[in-house]
Amino acid sequence: MAHKSPVSYRIAPTNPNAHVFTIHIDIPAHNSEQLHLALPSWLPGSYMIRDFAKNIITFKASFDDGSAVSFYKTDKQNWVIQNNGRAVFIEYQVYAFDLSVRTAYLDNQRGFFNGSSTLLEVKELAQHSCSLHISPPEGITGWRVATGLTRAKQTDIYKFGEYLAKDYQHLIDCPVELGNFDVLEFTVEDVPHYLVFAGKHFADKARLTKDVAKLCKHHIQLFGEAPFKEYWFITNLLGNGFGGLEHKNSTILVASRFDLPNPNKPRETSDNYKTFLSLCSHEYFHAWNVCRIKPEEFVPYDLSKEVHTTQLWAYEGITSYYDDFSLYRAGIISFEDYLNLLAKTMTRVHRGDGELKQSVKDSSFDTWTKFYKQGPDAVNNIVSYYTKGSLVALWLDLTIRLHSNQQHSLDDVMRLLWQQHGKTGIGTNEQDFVNALNQFAMQDLAKDFKNHLNSMARMDLSELLSQVGVKLDKRAYDAINSIAVSKSIDKKPYLGAFYQEQPQGLKITAIEQDSPAEKAGLSIDDVIVAIDMMKMNDKSLKQLLAHTQLNSTLTCHYFRDDLFIETEIQVVDSPKKAINLAIEDKLKNSIWLTIK
């Protein structure tokens, strides 16, 4: 068999019912006695060691005459091939049964893979161009291919066949969806976009296309250009699910099939649909902010080990600020709707004490162990660099607007970072953000800015919001299992335990510090079966508490593992932890909402 000059990969869904992909790598003759093959431990955008190599089932290597090649492993993810300078054929199988956006999945309904979890790197040839031939499954018809990889000349869009990558990093940055999926096509600023949906859905397709196109146009115009020639939104629709992962010209999303716009309610923008659009907005914004503008520690990525940075507050936080705000700026939701979304974000930050124990920079640095491996103490002991970072971004935007007399905004910072870092490939450090802030705010605000990054204190934005015509006040939670703000002044019963309803009772998922639930000795994973001698489900608990005098003490029965335990729990008024935002002065609102 003749070898092509680039490294040639072939992948086939050889046994969908067993969830197995088979991969071949044709490696040309190379002036080296050994070749080193490796699979990443993690992938960009998801900061946790994933150990993808654990899913490799079989592995063998041979020369072109069929004779076996000697090889050995040096650790869990690295192979050494004794090729003696000759061309080598590698064949291995990967077990694919992860429905998340991070790894790979295969059954008789669809297939999906990230190259980082399936395609081995040939280290000696990692900088060379390579090809990937994608084969259809045997015995299954109607499947197509969706990917941001470059199509070879003989491969039409959506077709199985040969795809091209400029190097290994490019190859693994373009995930691939296989199956009988639905596609919506549209063009924004002369760039073709593809909305791919795997799974049954009932969406108002015209509305969905129009809304996502508005968001794409907003982001492209904000940065001044699109850094890709085409873009793919690839969504796996489940009965219940949520998630996303960014790539340079695509994103992989997981959503509920009922999150999409209802064709029977053309004037309704449900909370679930807002969440889906915000997810699209977030991952698309990442095409600039983190895929190209990125921390200096990520240039280049070392996917073999943890890589720490204190800058994720900027890359996830700023992106989280723009994801919801862009829904308003693109004309999809009202300003009042946006303020409600922002209030929920602020409530998530302020509800626990993590903000008092961890700075947003430390949260960024500790993401590998504290954010992606959250323990039962997370609500009380860590702060999210997504949500707290978005509040820092809000502070940056409003501060720049006010100090520059509306001449500049956070938009200018992002455009500057794009020109100086995104287009040049030079990674950022903290001082780059300080310099940009001072430049556009027209004065030195480094001290205030660094205080927000390093502080372990509540971030009070009430005065800043007041200057742009928005009133912030703190209210009770609306319900015992919700962080939504109460719209009334009535007292609201509070336990401080959040739960999921199950057939046997209410399984606790989180407990707030110093709450009645904590004082009663309840813990994560306890299952409450009865309170005040009444069987508990979500409805019965709400009815009971609605008819119980505040400061009453009730008997609570619950299971911890297989032990049946009794305790006493006090019903108190909800603490004022929920944030409410309201328009106070529409004229002042223009300071925030005007786009220069």
Image (cartoon, rainbow, N blue to C red):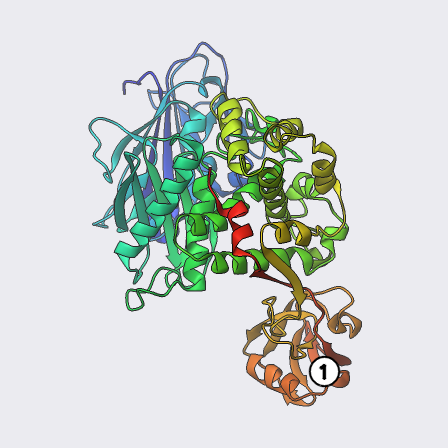
Could one spot residue 102 in this view of the protein? no
- Neighbourhood count class around disc 1 (C-alpha, 10 Å): few under 14, some 14–19, many 20 upward: many
Q: In which quadrant of the rendered view does residue 498 lie?
A: bottom right
Q: What element carries label 1?
A: strand
> Is 251 in front, or is 147?
251
Q: In this view, does 214 lie above or below 484?
A: above
Amino acid carrying mark 1 in the image:
Cys
* Residue 247 shown left or right of residue 506 in the figure: left
* Residue 323 shown left or right of residue 308 in the figure: left
Q: Mark 1 points at which residue?
A: 556
Q: Which residue is drawn at 63% across and 74% down?
A: 480
Q: Residue at x 29, y 63 (%)?
A: 202
Q: Which residue is drawn at 34% across and 51% down?
A: 211
Q: In which quadrant of the rendered view does residue 268 lie?
A: bottom left
Could one spot residue 157 in this view of the protein? yes
Q: Which residue is drawn at 44% across and 58% down?
A: 334
Q: Give the percent coordinates (x, y) of residue 564.
A: 71, 80
Q: In this view, does 311 lie above or below 199?
A: above
> Is 294 in front, or is 396?
396
Q: Is residue 374 above or below residue 84?
A: below
